[in-house]
Amino acid sequence: MASYQRFQTVSSGTQNLFDPDSPVWVSRYRLSLDLESGKRLLQLRMVNRSDKKISRVFLRIKCFEATTRKATVLELVPMPAVLALPGRAFGERSLVEITPPQTSFVEAFAQRVVFSDGTAWDESSTRNYLAFAEPVPVRTDDPDYGMLKERAQQGGVRNSYRFHTQKGVWTCTCGQPNSGASLRCDHCGADRLWLEKNMDPDYREPAPTPAPEPVQQPAPAPQPAPVVVPILPAPQAPQVNPYPIAPVVITRPSPRPEPEEEEPRRGHPGRVIAVILAIVLLCAGAWCAWRYLRPYLRYKDAVEELNAGNYEEAQRIFEDLGDYRDSPERITQAQLQKIRDVMKDGNYAQALELLKAVKDLPGADELTADCVYSLGVVAFNEGDLDAAWTYVRRLEEEYPNYESLPRLRTFCYYNSGNRKANEAASLEDAEARILAYEDAIYQFSMAEGYGDSAERMKECSYRIGIEQMNMGELTLAVDTFTTLGDYKSSQQYKSDCMFRYAQLHVRDTDQTTMDYLDELAEAGYDGAEELRDRYNGVGFDFRLIASQEGEEQGLTEQSEISDLTEIAIRYAVEPTDENGAVLVLVRYTLPDGRQGRGVLNSDGSASGMKRWKELNFPTACTKTGTIRVEFFDSARGETEALQTVSFQYVHQESIPEEDPVDPQTPTE
């Protein structure tokens, strides 16, 4: 069966206009169609550019219809309640309904912004919007091209566009515009301060300012960092000359005896020709030796230099030999073997620089990936987590299938989570602490279950729940503690938050309050049943008193009463509305088994006193025992008593009186 997708994207994109005076920058939007209801819903990504916390945002939305080219402007459209910290992105989880039914795309701007301190900002009537400056590409004919390319490779960032700052916006070297309050690029994650210092040719180092006195902070608990062994290239077998040279044996003619001395004769023309021919042959032999034997000997020298580790000299000789035998392949071997030796010594940065000159050679990519990974490992083991992340990002971009990348990335995520959690504990602002803990949870979740990541996530969520509880965000705290289950004191804190919320909303028509009270009452939480009755409109106080010798005493289970006519009931019932209080039904049970009922406040009064006799209850009982009096809400019936009061009744036999005797009457 095909899966059903409820929401269909109509359009999405980024906004090329922004108001430089607005505290809120609307950077992106997504317009979706709800296929069930037919409504068009808008999601916005906004950035708080101010230095204050924002509590409410009202939007001005311009809706465009692609078919009719009609534009409709919606004014002061409220966003759901937000709480945006300075420099933070927000709003992506909130949905705004767009009423024009055929809207194809929109433009949205902040029209009114309300800050948490009560102040507000309103859009000016001029609506002076600025357009993002087009990113300026870095071309090969730029005078700074070489310098920018080298720095980009060192920092692991892109070198596609010029770093540029505009009022309220800065453009990354990848071409992405970002808010002026953002310290990292939303697209590639590049650090703004690093880009400004290294990728802006006009940057000037600011004058140093005196450093403040260091503040002694308690050292956070050390977190064990996994030790990663950098990759070292496999050792290469020693090179052996594949072309052994056999010794050259030069044959010489056998010596002949000296001829006898003859008389001088006249020169013969044949002898001159023989001498000339011998000279020609000798020159030809010398030329052949130079032409064929010399390269062979030079090749032999180059192989020996290569095997001895003198790679530069070997490369020079092989280059002089040109295409002789396998000299081109030997040049590649010399270059890569030199880089491997540099890597063996742990000089990965130097090896990376050498690889730039041979990046097109077979095997250079693998060595480059090894160098980048090893530099990340070294930075990680030295505690420079930011630098380690730089190399991880480079591997993700250039070598996403590198075998050891997930391992290093997992370690970086885990330690980033530890760092965020430790930073959160030292922050003064509660909301900032919550955001830091949420960031730590994300880092631990990306660690793919490494070590105690799951427990660390629970601890961060537990801290978030405590912060939410202390801030009064009780429903959020309840949800947080619910997800934690039995972790530490989560269940107790959850019940406390539910009860506190119910106390604050006991007079409101709030289904959440009723759900909380029902759950607490079922769990036997102290005071939950009474508070639930109050939520249902029954705030009550019932007391049975007895008047004896002019004094009143409250009746308890230990009280003993022999005359029911002395009993009275004081009551106080909280009114549920302007028409009066809830009518209270009273039910009694006597020791002899008799029961009866009566309405305590038949006149609708909220408080007063009724005597036992006024309710037409029996004033005598023939048996000693416990009398139980129960009070009920007449609207709900006798399902659950609001309150029960018991006391002891002592039956006393009455003595019959004798008839008076007339003293004048004689007795027998």
Image (cartoon, rainbow, N blue to C red):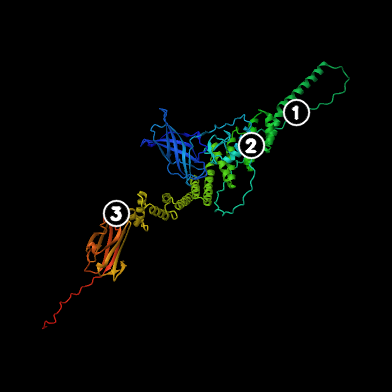
Tell which residue pokes out farthest to the right in this image.
263
Which dot, 1 or 2, sits closer to the camera?
2
Q: Are marks 3 and 1 in contact (CB under 8 Å)?
A: no
Q: CA distance from mark 2 to mark 3?
A: 91 Å
Q: Which residue is mark 3?
A: 580
Judged from the image, the secondary structure of the residue bearing numbered disc 1 is: loop
Q: Quadrant of residue 233?
A: top right
Q: Which residue is mark 1?
A: 251
Q: Is residue 187 left or right of residue 667?
A: right
Q: Please name the amino acid that badge 3 sits on.
A: Gly
Residue type pointed to by label 1: Thr
Decide which of 285, 393 is in the foreground and name it: 393
Q: If you read the primary sequence from the N terminus, does the residue marked by circle 2 or circle 3 appear first?
A: 2
* Amino acid type for the residue under numbered disc 2: Leu
Of badges 3 and 1, the one in the foreground is 3
Task: Judge from the rendering whether residue 5 lies leftward or rightward of residue 568; answer left or right.
Answer: right
Between 34 and 601, the residue placed more toward the observer is 601
Q: Is residue 389 visible?
A: yes
Image x and y of residue 597, in percent: 23, 60
**Location of the N terminus (image quadrant):** top left
Mark nearest the camera among 2 and 3 is: 3
Q: Nearer the viewer, residue 304 or 311?
A: 311
Q: SS class of the residue under badge 3? A: loop
Dot label at residue 354:
2
Classed neighbour count for the residue bearing mark 3: other residues with Cα under 10 Å, few (<14), some (14–19), many (≥20): some
Name the residue rendered at 29%, 54% in the picture.
580
Cα–Cα gap, marks 1 and 2: 50 Å
Q: How many marks?
A: 3
> How far apart are the two marked residues, 3 and 1, measured between alpha carbons?
138 Å
